[in-house]
């Protein structure tokens, strides 16, 4: 039987900076959301249109996670109806450089990856 302790539970990847960051920004939607915010502040529906095939629930969850990790700032303006805008923080801006490198690598190597997958499917 497991022994109960008073120690707080660590979040997944808390002891490993690589895994902790990649778990969050490596999902299907985070990079696309960060890329969409590169040009400045956007409202939720603007992000929905720009990203395309993301559901409202998934965009909401992705934005919440990116905000929790300090990549995105959410600003609510006190008006009726409330206006909410999202923008990259300084941390989010600093991530654009390695993100663009990764995106460029993926675009350049996509045909080779697809070929390798097809060879392995036919093997």
Image (cartoon, rainbow, N blue to C red):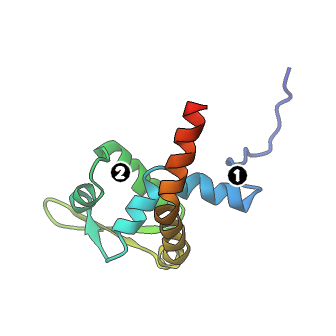
Taking the spot 46% from the left edge, 50% from the top edge, the residue there is 28
Quarter occupied by the N terminus: top right
Can you tell which mark lies on residue 117?
Answer: none
Visible residue check, residue 45: yes
Occupied quadrant, residue 87: bottom left
Could you say which is closer to the camera, residue 75 or residue 37?
A: 37
Residue 60 in the image, given as x and y percentages of width and height: 36, 50
Nearest the eye: 101 or 80: 101
* Label 1 crowd (10 A; few <14 / some 14-19 / many >=20): some
Note whether residue 74 is visible. Answer: no
Give the quarter of the image for residue 117: top right
| Element class at badge 1 | loop
Residue 48, quarter of the rendered image: bottom left
Q: Residue at x 48, y 55 (%)?
A: 111
Counting from the top left corner in percent of width and height, residue 82 is at 20, 61
Height in image: 114 above or below 63? Answer: above
Query: Pointer 2: residues within 10 angstroms few (<14), some, or many (20+)?
Result: some
Q: Earlier in the sequence, mark 1 or mark 2?
A: 1
Q: Residue furthest left?
A: 80
Q: Residue at 41%, 48% (x, y): give it.
A: 61
Residue at mark 2: 59
Name above or below for residue 8 compared with residue 73: above
At a point 40% along the width and 57% down the height, the residue shown is 63
Q: Are marks 1 and 2 in contact (CB under 8 Å)?
A: no
Label 1 belongs to which residue? 13
Tell me where residue 84 appears, x and y as whole percent.
26, 64
Q: CA distance from mark 1 to mark 2?
A: 23 Å
Where 40 falls versus 31 (above or below)?
A: below
Q: Nearer the viewer, residue 18 or 43?
A: 18
Q: Secondary structure at mark 2?
A: helix
């Amino acid at each position: 039987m497991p022994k109960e302790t008073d120690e707080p539970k660590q979040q997944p990847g808390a002891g490993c900076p690589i895994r902790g960051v990649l778990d969050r920004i490596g999902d299907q939607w985070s990079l696309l959301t960060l890329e969409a915010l590169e040009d400045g502040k956007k409202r939720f529906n603007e992000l929905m249109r720009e990203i395309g095939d993301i559901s409202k629930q998934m965009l909401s969850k992705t934005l919440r996670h990116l905000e929790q990790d300090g990549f995105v700032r959410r600003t609510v303006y006190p008006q009726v109806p409330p206006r909410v805008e999202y923008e990259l923080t300084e941390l989010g801006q600093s991530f654009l450089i390695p993100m663009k490198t990764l995106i460029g690598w993926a675009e350049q190597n996509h045909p080779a990856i697809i070929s390798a997958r097809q060879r392995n499917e036919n093997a």
